[in-house]
Each structure stands twice: as structure tokens, then as C-alpha cells.
Image: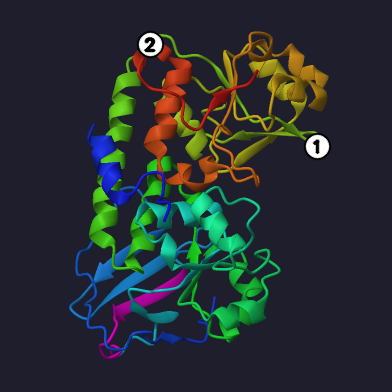
Amino acid sequence: MTKYFISSIALLLIVSSCSKPNQKVSESKNSDSSEKVNLFTPDIKYAKRFTININDQYKTLIVENPWEEQDTLMSYVLYSKGTKKPDNVDWADFILSVPIEEVITTSSPHVGMLGLIDQWDKIKGVATDQYVYSSYIYDRIQNGEIAKIGSIKGTNLEVVLDLDPDLVMKTGYDNVRNEDERLIEAGVPLSYNVEWMETNMLARAEWIKYVAAFFNKDQEADSIFNSIEKEYLKAIKIAENVENKPSILTGNNFKGTWYMPGADSYMAKLILDAGGDFHFKNEKSTGSLPLSFEVVLDNLMDADYWIGPRAQSLNDLKIQDERYLLFKPFKEGNVYTFNKRMSQNGGNDYWESGMTRPDIILKDLVKIFHPELLPDHNLYYYKKLQ
């Protein structure tokens, strides 16, 4: 079996260098199992959108609704396989016996998180093979070992019911529960992951602890995250006292609008943590700022670096819009994209494993902005456009 590019063990070595749905009680596929719920409670340091608690019988997971204050998007009670369902827990949306054995994933970051805790063999379905980076997962799809269930909005209910998964992992967004009404009515256990609504990369990566709870991998996930956090903070320390902070341009024009990250977005914080300067760092928003081409040109024509445009080469950018030639980083060849690790079928590892490895992404940006600070680091997710 081809393992994830960094296994749980290898990672440690590297870094040390809104109504309730119909409830479903997930019964054990191996009813003789007596494995107990992991009573270890991870400390949630950065993530604001989920909580984990335990008592002597079960774990509770609560996913907060980012779009409604003091509202729950989804709630779970997790109890040990082979034991009696706990009493007085009918308040939960789903009551599941753990560790779960079969999961359907519907986005790249889900695959990355499962890989980091060495649970790829539990994946029984994906939305599509188009954006899968892992060759192990892709090969299993082609061999028929992993089913394709279709797009998130067009999920094939019959395929899902036939697979009978312990959990379907989906990206949570506003109104998602209404769109999933058929799945909910059918009693399909759903996990709404809203890690993308967190405001920094460490918070996003910390969702590995949420995912791990379904597999009783709490301690492993906590240890892995602590190592990632240590490396991320170390990289911040390296860059925090730089005197020269280059100006950074991000993204590109799309159908007349240039979407720039808001000040409270993870990308803006990554730029600042890497010792860069971001013109819109005071524009408070967790999402994107929709700007005109002219506004971006007026404010960032003389930026030092341009990161993250959707392009394969400088000529590709020129073909998209000749006005890009007006920007200083284009003229000087200081344009970088995060598509260094691409699979033949179009999968981008930046979105698969990168969302769990903010420490590597941060080091890439430090290397780009201040190459002298990390002389031995080779760009992993980013590459310079030629």
C-alpha cells in the first residue's frame, strides 16, 4: 500500500527535525468488538468551530454554525462499539458507535486529514476522482474499491445507501442541511466540516482532531498537531524580526473581479506570518474582498511578489489578460503558484495535504519572501512560474 506522503510516525520524525434530522444509531459492523471510546480529550487551541467533550460513557462533538450565532450546525454522541447505546442522548443529531470503519469523503482536505492519521483504508466513496492527488486513493477508485458518488449537490442517494457508510464527510456551508434533506431523512450520518471558515491555518489544521474523534485516533491527532504547531511557530519566529517586508499581491482577475483575501482570512495571516506586507491587511473580512482590476493595479502595481494566480506559466497569465504585464512582479518574474504538486488527473496536493500542513506552506512563503532565512528549505507546494 502506498502510504500518505507523511505518515503519522514519519511526521513526528520530520518535524522534530436547524431542526434535528432523523437520528441514526450506527451499529458495529463487528459487534463483538469491545474497544472503548478513547477517553483522551484533546486541547483545542485555535479552532473556534467545534468542541469535543467526554464522560465515562461517550464523547460529544459539536459543530458550531458559523452563519448563526450560538447555533449548532451538527451534534454527535460517539460511544464504543460492542457496548450499550448511552441513555438520555436523544438531543444529538447522530449517535454513532466508534471507531467507524467506512467513510465517504467529498473534498480534498478530508482526504488529507484521513491520510495524516493513517485512515485512508476506511474511505469507501468519494465525490469524484478528478481532483484526487493521492495515487493510492486514485488507484483504488480506478480499481472499483472506492465508489464515485457524484457532485456534492447532485449526490446519488442510491449509491450512498448501497454503500451504507458509517459517515459521509461533507463541507459545511450555509443552508447545507436543507440541501441534504434526502440524506438526512434516509438516516445517513453526515459530518459537516467547516474548517474552511476558520480564520488561520493552524485553526484549519486543528480539525484533524475533530476527524480523528470518529476513528478513536484522538491521541495520535493531538500529537501530530502539536508537532505541526511547533514547526509553524518556529517559522514565525524566524521571520518576525525582518526589517524589509516585501509587498505581496495575491490571486488574479476573474470575470472582471479580483478577489483579494480579507484581513481576517488565513491567507492574509500567512503572508504576515511569513514576513510579508499585505496592502489590505486592515480590511476586516474573513472571506475575499471583491475588487476591480483598476483598484488592484492602483494599489499593488509595484508589489514585490505575486503569489497564487491560477496559471501554469507567465505566458499563460499574459494570455489571460495582457494588463498583467503592468505589474512589477510579472516584469521581474517573481510570480509563484501553489501547484507544484499536481497529479496527472488534475489533483493538487496543496488542497489535499497542504490544508493539514500549514507549517510547510508557511516555510514555502518565508523561502519566497526571505530566501536567506531558510537556505536549506526547498519549495514544497509552491513553484516559480517560468
Nearest the viewer among 371 and 48 is 371
Q: Secondary structure at mark 1?
A: loop
Give the residue pinned by disc 1.
255
Nearest the viewer among 8 and 180 is 8
Taking 336 as reference, is 117 left or right?
left
Q: Please identify the quadrant where the C terminus is shown.
A: top right
Taking 364 as reference, is 292 left or right?
right
Amino acid under disc 1: Lys
Q: Tell me: residue 384, above or below residue 341.
A: above
Give the residue pinned by disc 2.
372
Taking 377 as reference, is 261 left or right?
right
The circle on residue 14 is none
Label 2: few (<14), some (14–19) or many (≥20) C-alpha neighbours in 10 Å: few
Magenta span contains residue 202: no
Nearest the viewer among 71 and 17 is 17
Magenta region: which residues? 73-87
Image spot of residue 172 (x, y percent): 54, 62
Q: Tell me: residue 214, above or below residue 22.
A: above
Magenta span contains residue 80: yes
Give the quadrant of residue 106: bottom right
Image spot of residue 134 (x, y percent): 51, 50
- Specify the color scheme: rainbow
Q: Secondary structure at mark 2?
A: helix
> Nearer the viewer's eye, disc 1 or disc 2?
2
